[in-house]
Image: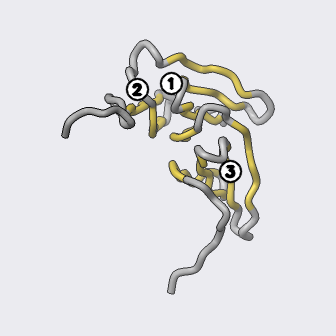
Amino acid sequence: MLKVELDGLSFPEGPRWHQGRLYFSDFYQHGVFALDTEGQVQRVVTVDHQPSGLGWMPDGRMLIVSMLDRRLLCFDGKVLREHADLSALAAWHCNDMVVDGVGRAYVGNFGFDTHGDAEP
């Protein structure tokens, strides 16, 4: 039987299990959240331009894809900073990401204007 663990979300995505909690982004609520094993949710950090993919550096810092401004952000638990500006490499919104064991981040992007009027 399915059980709803959390409601009131807008568009959660990018789930990652890290240190006993399920982290995810909700880009319409402009935040990264963590759900613990007791069912408690916490906003970890606010990201203004729609957060998406999540990952961690070997030193524990969280990497967050900022979709609309095409940046990779780094959160050390206190301060959110730009880690890399991807706007020259990605023509449209960045999206999901994976981070390998040595901290290399692989970020995907849509590659086209998803809201444009292109012919199918």
Residue corresponding to mark 2: 92
Circles 2, 1 touching at the beta carbon (< 8 Å) = yes
Q: CA distance from mark 2 to mark 1?
A: 8 Å
Residue corresponding to mark 3: 33
Circles 2, 3 touching at the beta carbon (< 8 Å) = no
Circles 1, 3 touching at the beta carbon (< 8 Å) = no
Mark 1 vs 3, N-terminal side:
3
Q: Nearer the viewer, mark 2 or mark 3?
A: 2
Compared to residue 73, the image places residue 33 above or below, namely below
Compared to residue 13, the image places residue 101 above or below, namely above
Which residue, as the protein is rendered here, is positioned at the far top?
88
Mark 2 vs 1, N-terminal side:
1
Query: For the residue marked with disc 3, what is the amino acid?
Result: Phe
Query: For the residue marked with disc 1, what is the amino acid?
Result: Arg
Position of 83 with respect to 95 (left or right) is right
Position of 79 with respect to 9 (left or right) is right
Residue depicted at x 36% and y 30%: 113
Secondary element under disc 1, as helix, strand or loop, is loop
Position of 77 with respect to 105 (left or right) is right
Q: Nearer the viewer, mark 2 or mark 1?
A: 2
Residue 100 in sight here: no
Residue depicted at x 52% and y 81%: 2
Compared to residue 55, the image places residue 79 above or below, namely above
Q: CA distance from mark 2 to mark 3?
A: 25 Å
Secondary element under disc 3, as helix, strand or loop, is strand
Compared to residue 33, the image places residue 101 above or below, namely above
Residue corresponding to mark 1: 70
Please, which colouring scheme is shown?
secondary structure
Residue 74 coordinates in the image, percent (x, y): 64, 28
111 or 120: nearer the viewer: 120
93 or 82: nearer the viewer: 93
Mark 2 vs 3, N-terminal side:
3
